[in-house]
């Protein structure tokens, strides 16, 4: 197996998603590009009515922004490799150990069909399972895509997105501490709306985690 990997490295070297430099198979990011985007933190004012705060790993800029966009809109499924090394270096896992269940923010059915996958699953699912968490990819269902959010205020965004998430009838979240995961945290309106539905369905708490955010 080792030999096979050594050979694979020669023929298909792993390159840093930021600069294209050849890097170690387990490392994926070169230290320089990694340091440019890495900014793990609990987001200020992410503690809302239903969301018990939201953590993020990176600033939403540079290489991380680029690979999220490529995975989301460019069909570059191979980009999923960039995320486990980031998750592995997240320094606050001890604060999230009480969350055994992980639920992704879902896509609408229409989007899911045209894209063929939820990019959030590709970013988190495998890693979370290895970490011993229970990943529930269809825990929430999304009834429709949000209208374009970019021109709306925070309150308007929340109104716009309110009630679009529904709990999957076959999933029981009662009394459970849920880790809600998404690719990007912008204003928190999506997370708050999804958390609202999980709390309504009886979840004990909902804490957020995203790959990147432009928020403080
Ligand atoms: Zn690099």
Image: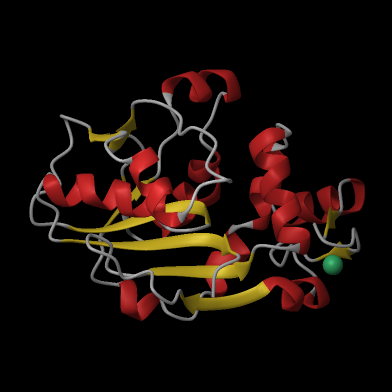
Residue 90 vs residue 196, the one in the foreground:
196
Q: Where's residue 128, x and y in %?
A: 41, 56
Quadrant (top left, top right, bottom left, bottom right) of the C terminus? bottom right
Residue 79 vs residue 211, the one in the foreground:
211
In the displayed structure image, the side of residue 120 where residue 102 appears, left or right:
left
In the displayed structure image, the side of residue 64 where residue 146 appears, left or right:
left
In the displayed structure image, the side of residue 210 where residue 54 appears, left or right:
left
Q: Quadrant of ligand 1?
A: bottom right
Say if 134 sits above or below 40 in the image: above
In the displayed structure image, the side of residue 22 where residue 178 appears, left or right:
left
Q: Quadrant of residue 165?
A: top left
Instruction: Please name the residue shown 22% across and 50% down the image.
Output: 196
Instruction: Please name the residue shown 22% across and 59% down the image.
Output: 50
Say if 92 sits above or below 108 in the image: below
Residue 199 vs residue 63, the one in the foreground:
199
Q: Where's residue 7, x and y in %?
A: 85, 50
Number of numbered callouts drawn = 0
Instruction: Please name the residue shown 45% across and 34% down the image.
Output: 146
Q: Where's residue 115, x and y in %?
A: 59, 25
Q: Is residue 129 visible?
A: no
Q: Is residue 182 visible?
A: yes
Colouring convention used in this rendered image of the protein: secondary structure
Residue 131 vs residue 111, the one in the foreground:
111
Q: Where's residue 5, x and y in %?
A: 76, 53
Q: Quadrant of residue 169?
A: top left
């Amino acid at each position: 197996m080792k030999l096979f990997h050594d050979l694979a490295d020669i023929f298909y070297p792993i390159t840093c998603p930021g600069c294209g430099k050849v890097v170690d198979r387990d490392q994926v990011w070169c230290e320089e590009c990694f340091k440019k985007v890495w900014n793990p933190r609990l987001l200020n004012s992410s503690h809302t009515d239903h969301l018990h705060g939201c953590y993020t790993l990176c600033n939403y800029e540079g290489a991380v922004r680029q690979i999220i966009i490529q995975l989301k809109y460019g069909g570059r499924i191979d980009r999923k490799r960039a995320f486990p090394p980031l998750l592995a270096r997240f320094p606050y896992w001890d604060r999230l150990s009480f969350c055994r269940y992980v639920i992704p923010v879902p896509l609408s059915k229409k989007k899911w069909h045209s894209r063929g996958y939820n990019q959030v699953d590709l970013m988190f699912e495998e890693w979370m399972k290895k970490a011993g968490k229970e990943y529930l990819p269809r825990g929430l269902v999304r009834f429709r895509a949000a209208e374009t959010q970019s021109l709306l205020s925070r309150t308007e965004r929340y109104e716009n997105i309110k009630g679009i998430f529904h709990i999957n009838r076959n999933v029981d979240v009662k009394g459970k501490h849920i880790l809600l995961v998404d690719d990007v945290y912008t204003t928190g309106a999506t997370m708050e709306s999804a958390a609202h539905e999980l709390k309504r369905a009886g979840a004990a708490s909902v804490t957020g985690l995203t790959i990147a955010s432009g928020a403080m």
